[in-house]
Image: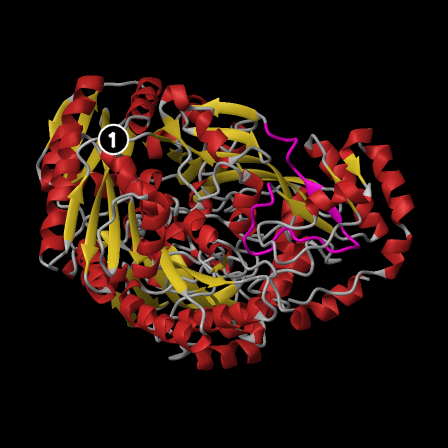
Amino acid sequence: MRPSSEDELAGMIASAGGPVRICGGGTRGLSGAGEVLQTGGMSGIVLHEPGALTLVAKAGTPLAEVEAVLEGAGQRLPFEPMDARGLLESDGVPTVGGMAAANVSGPRRIQAGACRDYMLGVRFVDGAGRVVSNGGRVMKNVTGYDLVKLMAGSFGTLGVLTEVAFKVLPKPAAQAMLVLEGLSVAEAVAAMSRALGSAFDVTGAAHDPLAGRTLLRIEGFERSVGYRAERLQALLAGWIERDVVAVEEAWRSIRDVAPFHGRAGDVWRISCKPSDAPEVAARLGGDLLLDWGGGLVWALLPTGTDARAALAGIGGHATLVRGASQPRFAPQPEAVAAIAKGLRARFDPRGILNPGLMA
Amino acid sequence: MQMPDPSKRILSLKAEIVSRLRQVLPPDAVIDDPVETRAYECDALVAYRCPPLCAVLPSSTEEVSAVLALCHEMGVPVVPRGSGTSLAGGALPTADCVILGVARMNEVLETDYDNRFIRVQTGRTNLSVTGAMEEHDFFYAPDPSSQLACAIAGNIAMNSGGAHCLKYGVTTNNLLGVTMVLMDGTVIELGGAHLDAGGLDLLGVVCGSEGQLGVVTEATLRILRKPEGARPVLMGFDSNEVAGECVSDIIKAGVLPVAIEFMDRPCIVACEAFAKAGYPDCEALLIVEVEGSDAEIDEQLGLILQIARRHNPVELREAKDAEEAGRIWLGRKSAFGAMGQINDYMCLDGTIPVSELPRVLRRIGELSAEYGLKVANVFHAGDGNMHPLILFNANQDGQLELCEQLGAEILKLCVEVGGCLTGEHGVGIEKRDLMGVQYRPDDLEAQMAVKDVFDPKWLLNPAKVFPLAASKARRIAAE
C-alpha cells in the first residue's frame, strides 16, 4: 500500500483486512507481520513561516528536505534527531513521520527538549480509518487534550501520521565545545552535572569512554560562545575546540552512536537519572556511550544479554534498539499498561496497526 | 454558559456521602457547611458560581485515593481544584460534586541540583517552587501571571504558560513525572527523574487534560540554573502593523529573547494612567527581554535595537539598571489591575500565527466598534498568544452576554487565521461550547475516547472541555 493522500489512506485503513505495518523511511529496523504501508506518497512541506518559527510537513516528507529548507532560512529542528542508519545498518530515507512516531531526539534534548516538545500539531488516520486532527500550528495551544504528545513515540500503534507541524528555532551563529580527557564515568557525570547546572546554557553533554573524552557544547552568538566556553573551562579545566567542522562532526558521532557502528552485539538505550549512570555502567559492563549528561546510556552488549534484569531497581527504562532477544520496550506497571491497552483498543479497535510492536 | 442539572440522586445522598468521606479523612478535611462551601463556589471566572455538595482537603496521595475510590463507588462527580485561579472556569463546581482541593499538599519532597529536578506536592504554589531553590540560584521556568497564587496542580491541569515560555516552553516541556490518582483510587506513576516515556507518552496527555483524567498529587519538575542577568528594552511604534513586523524580524534574525510582550494603545493608555510607568504616547509598544551576562545581553540587544531602528520606532528605551528595568515591566505587569480599575473585563486567550498579528488586531478593532465594547490588547507576541481584554459593565443587564458574544467572535477569528481558542488558560467551561469551531466531531471523539479510558464513568470534572451536547451521552451513561 502506498497512498498518495490522507483520504486514500483513510480508505485503505478502513478496508484493511488484516495487520498493517507502517513504514516511513524504514530506517529504524522495525519488523513485524502485516502488509507494508508506505507513507512516502504523502510528501511535501505544507508551510514554512520563518517569522513564526513554524514548519508543517506531510508525514512521508524526507527529513533531509525539511532540514534543507530550514537551513536556507537559518533555522533548524532543535531536538537534533538521530540518523539511525549507521547503527542499524539500514538504508532508506528518514521521514518526518517516522521521526515523530518514534519521538527521535538527539544530544540537544537535554537542553532544548525532545521531538515531542517541538510537535505543535498532528493529523493522523486511526485504526478505524477515521481522520483525526489535534493541536495546530501555533506555539501555545491548550485547546483540548494534547494528543500530539500521545502520538509522538507511539510508533504508529494508535494511528498513521499524515501531517506534523513543528516549532523550529534559529540556528545559532557559532558553536564550540569544551573537551575533558581521561575521566572515569563517575567523574564525567559529575563534570557534566556541574556544566548543565551552570548558567552557561550547555546544549550537549556527552561522555565517550572508548575515546576517553567528555564533551560539553556551547552554541549562540560568537562572543557569547567564547565567553561561556571560557567560563566553563575555568570551572572544569580541559581545552576548547573552536573549529566548527570538528564540533559538528563530534556531535554527529554522538547523535548517531558512531562508536558502535559496524560492531556486533545488542544495542540498548537506557534512560535514567544522570547520577545513576555510573551504577548503570558498572552493572552492564560492555561498551558504553553516555549522552544527556549521563541521562542517556547507550550500551553495546553481547547478543542475548538481558539489560533490564541487570538494571533492576534503578529508575528509568531500557529499550532494545538493536537485537531481538528481549521485547523492544520495557514492560510497564500493570495499571499503566492497562491504560495503554485501553487507548490502543479505542484508537485501533481491530488491533491492526503495527500489532505487538509496543505491547 | 449552561451547566448540566445536578443529579437528584446525588443531592439526596448528601448526608451519607459526607459521613462516609469523614470516615476516610480527618474531620477538618471535609467541609459541608453551606456557608463554608461558598468559598469554593467559583474560580477566577467569577461570573459563574455554584457551591459544591461539599469540599474535601486531603493531605496525602493516600487520602486522595480514598476519596476518589469512595466517590467512584457512589457515582459522585469530583472537581479537582488547585488554587482556584482558573480564568476558564476549570474548577467551577456543580451542585452535585465534591470539590477536591489539593491546597494542604504543599511540601517540597526532594530537591536534586545534580540531576536538575525538584519533586513537590502539587498544592504548592508556582512561585514557591522557585522560592524553595532561591539560595541555590535555580528556578522553575513556567511563570503564569498568577504564579504567586496558582498551584502546580492547576498548572499541570491547564498546561500553563507564562511570559517567558518563548525560550523555556510551557508546563508540559518542564514536567518530568507525576504521581496521579485515577478516579477509581488507583495510584499510578508516570515519568520520573529520567527523560522520556518508556511506552506511550501518557504524561504528555495528562498535562493539559484539565483535571479530567486523574488527580495529580506529586510532580517532578525540571529546574534550571538562573541566568547571570536579564534586561528589557521598551520600543514604541506608530502602528500595530509595524510593531508586528518588528517582532517577526527579530525572530527571523536568530535572536531568541526570553519574552516579547506587546501592548496596543488602549492598553498603554490604561496602564499609564494606573501605574505611571512613563510609557510613550504611541499606538503599539513592545517589551523585549534578553538574558545572559552583561556582554551577552549587550550583544543581543545591539542586534535587536538595530532591527527596531529599521522600523522607525517613536521610542527606544534600554534599561540601564534594575530600577529602570522594573519601570519598563511595571506597566505591563499591572495591565490587568489597570483594566480592573476602569471596568469589569473578560480576558481572552487565543493564539494566532505571529504573521497574522496586524490583520487580527485590525479585525478586533472593527468588532469592538460593532459591539460597542472597548477591547485592549496585551499579549505574548513572540508566540502569538493574545490576551484581548474586553471591557464591560457587569452591573448592566445584557452586558456580560454581549461581552461573551464578542469574545466568541474574537476566538473564532483566531481559529480562522490558523490559530486556536486558548493558548494557556484552558477550555474549562468558558470555551467549551466553541470547541466545534476548532475541532471536527471525529477530533473531539478521539479526545473523549482518552477520557473514556482513564475515567470510564466520566466522574472527573465531567461538564468541562467538551461541548455539553458532545459529551452528553457519556455523562448520562455514567449516571
The quarter of the picture where residue A68 lies is: bottom left
The structure residue drawn at horizontal position 74% and vertical position 70%, both measured from the top left corner, is: B473
Q: Is residue B36 above or below residue A9?
A: above
Q: Secondary structure at mark 1?
A: helix
| Percent of width and height locating residue B446 | 58, 66
- The N terminus of chain B - image quarter: bottom right
Q: Residue B437: in sight, yes or no?
A: yes
Q: Which amino acid type is marked by label 1?
A: Ala
Q: Nearer the viewer, residue B309 or A174?
A: B309
| Percent of width and height locating residue A210 | 26, 28
Q: Is residue B307 above or below residue B479?
A: above
Q: Nearer the viewer, residue A336 or A232?
A: A232
Main SS of the magenta part reads: loop
Question: What is the total number of numbered labels drawn onto the structure image?
Answer: 1
The structure residue drawn at horizontal position 47% and vertical position 33%, both measured from the top left corner, is: B127
Q: Is residue B84 magenta?
A: yes
* Chain assignment, label 1: B
Q: Is residue B327 above or below residue B359?
A: above
Task: Determine which residue is flagged by label 1.
Answer: B322
| Percent of width and height locating residue A221 | 13, 41
Please give left or right for residue A185 compared with residue B61 in the image: left
Stretch of the chain drawn in magenta = B83-106
| Percent of width and height locating residue B276 | 31, 44
